Image (cartoon, rainbow, N blue to C red):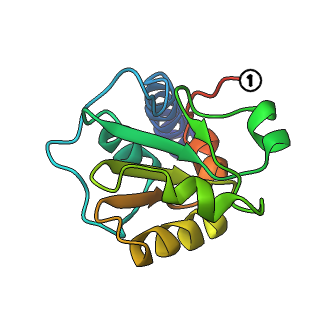
Amino acid sequence: MRRFAAAAAAGLVLAAAGLAGCSSGGVSTSVGPTATATPAAGSTLDPAGFAAAIKQPGTVLLDVRTPAEFAAGHLPNATLIDFESADFPTKVAALDKTKTYALYCRSSNRSGQAMALMQQAGFTSVYHLGGGINAWTAAGGNTVKG
């Protein structure tokens, strides 16, 4: 009987810890910590690190998914530049190379490729979200539709 009571008490403690972790609301583009420095160029960040980094003043948030994916849900304040479109290189060439760019896609494949292309084009401050928006939403990150 004592083992059962001890096991039940341990289960309640674990459940309470899990609920406390969920109550934080996950990662956010508007609340929570702001990174103290811009991530190193070419960095792959986890959702919490990405959320903190994109709050740095002057950071441009780029969604490199398709327009349909973007419309289904994207990070607040993101700008869409479809990696798969023929005019992707032209749109990237028009960007200010002195700014900091935070990229994401669905799983981090396209954003990783886009980041490499941007670095080859002379962008010196670009990083992306590891696991993409899938990791973002799994971590409780907020998105908007439209």
Q: Nearer the viewer, residue 5 or 131?
A: 131
Quadrant for the C terminus, please. top right
Instruction: Give the x, y percent position of residue 11.
Output: 54, 38
Which element type, helix, strand or loop, lies under badge 1? loop
Q: Residue at x 61, y 64 (%)?
A: 89
Residue located beneath label 1 in the image: 145
Q: Residue furthest right?
A: 68
Q: Amino acid at mark 1?
A: Lys
Q: Would residue 45 be seen by someone viewing this image from the given angle?
A: no
Q: Residue at x 31, y 39 (%)?
A: 52
Q: Residue at x 31, y 44 (%)?
A: 53
Q: Nearer the viewer, residue 11 or 62?
A: 62
Q: Quadrant of residue 110?
A: bottom right
User: From the viewer's perspective, is 110 left or right of 22?
Assistant: right
User: From the viewer's perspective, is 127 left or right of 99?
Assistant: right
Q: Nearer the viewer, residue 81 or 47?
A: 81
Q: Would residue 144 be seen by someone viewing this image from the given angle?
A: yes
Instruction: Give the x, y percent position of residue 2.
Output: 49, 40
Q: Residue at x 64, y 69 (%)?
A: 109
Q: Nearer the viewer, residue 53 or 91?
A: 91
Instruction: Give the x, y percent position of residue 67.
Output: 80, 41
Badge 1 crowding class, 10 Å Cα cut-off, few under 14, some 14 to 19, many 20 or more, is few
Instruction: Give the x, y percent position of residue 5.
Output: 52, 35
Figure label count: 1
Quadrant for the N terminus, please. top right
